[in-house]
Amino acid sequence: MKVIHHGGHEGVTGSCHQVLLDDRRSLLVDCGLFQGDDARGRDEEQIDFPLDGIQGLILTHVHIDHIGRVPYLMGAGFRGPIYCTPPTAKLLPLMLEDAMRIGVTRNKKLIERFLHELRRHVRPLAYGKWHKLDGGVQIRFSPAGHILGSAYVEVDYKNERYVFSGDLGSTNSPLLIDPVSPQRADLLVLESTYGDRLHEGRDVRSQQLEQILCRTLQNKGVTIIPAFSLGRTQELLYELNEIFRRVEEEQGCSLLKRVNVVVDSPLALRLTQIYDSMREYWDNEAKHVLTYDDQPLVFNNLVHISEHDEHRDMVEYLRDSKMPAIVIAASGMCTAGRVVNYLKAFISESTTDVVFIGFQSHGTPGRYIQDGKDWVRLDGQRFDIRATAHTLSGYSAHADQADLIRFVTQMDERPKAIRLVHGEQQARTVLAEKLRELGYQVD
C-alpha cells in the first residue's frame, strides 16, 4: 500500500488521504475543507485528483476540516460507500447541511437533494470490530476521544496495516472515552496539531474558567467564547454545570447564577440533543454524573438562541442592558457565524473577555485576536481590540505532545514508520524530533 495526501499533510486543515491498495483500487480517508492560510489560492470546489478506482470514503469524524469537501467530492461524481461510526453517521447530515447553507447555497431543495443522496451512501460501522470491504480489505474504527463519533481507523490489506489517527482527543475530556493505542502499524499517519506543547490540567482550566466568570460578574461585561458547535460546546456546558454546582456547595449560595449563559447556535442545540441521546458513547465519568444529575448539559441559567431574530435581539439586549453574560457561539475560529456579530458589538469594550478554547489557524480573525493584535477585520470592517483575550489550552479537543507520544509508545509493536500530518511546521518539527529521540522512524 501507499498513501497520497490531498490535504492536511503540510498544514492543519483540509485533511484528505488516499490509500493506494494496488494499481487500480484505493480508499480515501477524510475529505475536509481548507481554512485560514491553508485555503489561500485554492479552489475548494475543484477536486484536483482523479476519482477512478476510489472504492470508498472513510470518515474519522465530522469536523469541517475533515468532511467539508464531501459535497464537492460527490458533485465530481463519487458514488461509493461512506464508512464511519454510528454517531458520525447521525451527525454528518447536520454538519454538512450547516456548512452548505453557509458556504455553498441557501436553496433548501438543493441541500435536501444532496442530503438524500448522502444518506444513501453512508455505511455506519461499529467500533472495535474488523469490517470486511470488497477485495479483501478490512478496516476497524476505535475511539479517538476527540468529539462524539470520532475514531482512528486501521486499514488492513494483505497483512499490511496502515493506521490513520484522524484527530486524537486530549485525556482531559470529561465526556468521551480516551483513545487506546492500536497493536501495530506498518505506517502510522499521526496528527500533530499540538505536537510542540502541553495542555494545562483539567483542574487548572476549570479554575481559570471560574475566574473569568467571576470577572464577568464584577465588571458586568460580556465574555465571548468562540466554540465549534460540536464537541467544545457540549464539554463547556458540562463543565459550567459542574462549576455552578461546586460554587453553590462551597459557598452556600449561587452567585454565578446571576450571569446568563447564552448558547447562540441552532446547530449547537441540535448537536447537544444528539450528544444527550447517545449516552452509551460517553465515558465512565460522565455516566457516573448521570447518577445524581440526569441533565448534565442543561442548567437553570442556560439560554438557547435558535432563530435569527432572537440572535439579533440578544446582541442588542446585551449591548443596552449592560448585564453580565457568557456567550458561546460558532464559529470556533471567528471566520463566520453568529459569534462574529457578538465580536463586532463588544470587541472594542474593555469589559469584554474573549476566551479561546480551540486551535486558531493562521490567517483567521480568531488568531488575530488571540495573538493580541490592536485590531481585527470582521465582515470587511476594521474593529479596534480593547477586549482581553484568554487561551485555555486545557479545553482543546486535540491531544497535546504528551498524549501523542503516549499514543505511539503504548503500541504493542513499534510502528515501522510514522508520518506526521495536520500540524503547522513548528509543531510537526518538534514532535518529529521527540519521536526520533525515542528511536522511531518519522518521515
Image: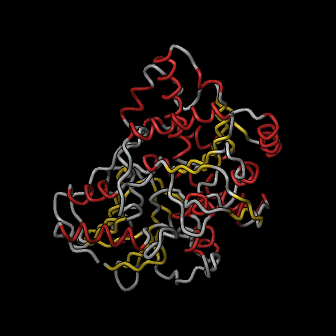
* Res 145 seen here: yes
Percent position of residue 338, x then y = 72, 51
Q: Height in image: 341 above or below 202? A: below
Q: Nearer the viewer, residue 186 or 64?
A: 64
The answer to whether residue 113 shows anywhere in this view is no
Residue at the limit of the structure toward the bottom, as seen here: 23
Q: Is residue 42 left or right of residue 168?
A: right
Q: Toward which corner of the image does residue 352 lie, by quadrant?
A: top right
- In the picture, measured across the screen, residue 42 lies left or right of residue 438, that is right
x and y, in percent, of residue 375 in the image: 68, 62
Residue 97 figure quarter: bottom right
Query: In the depicted view, which residue is nearer to us: 107 or 6?
Result: 6
Where does the C terminus fall, quadrant-wise? bottom left
Identify the image quadrant of the N terminus. bottom left
User: Where residue 39 sits: x, y (%)?
Assistant: 59, 74
Residue that appears at 56% across and 71% down: 34
At 41% from the left and 74% from the top, the residue drawn is 425
**Residue 189 spot, x, y in % from top left:** 34, 69
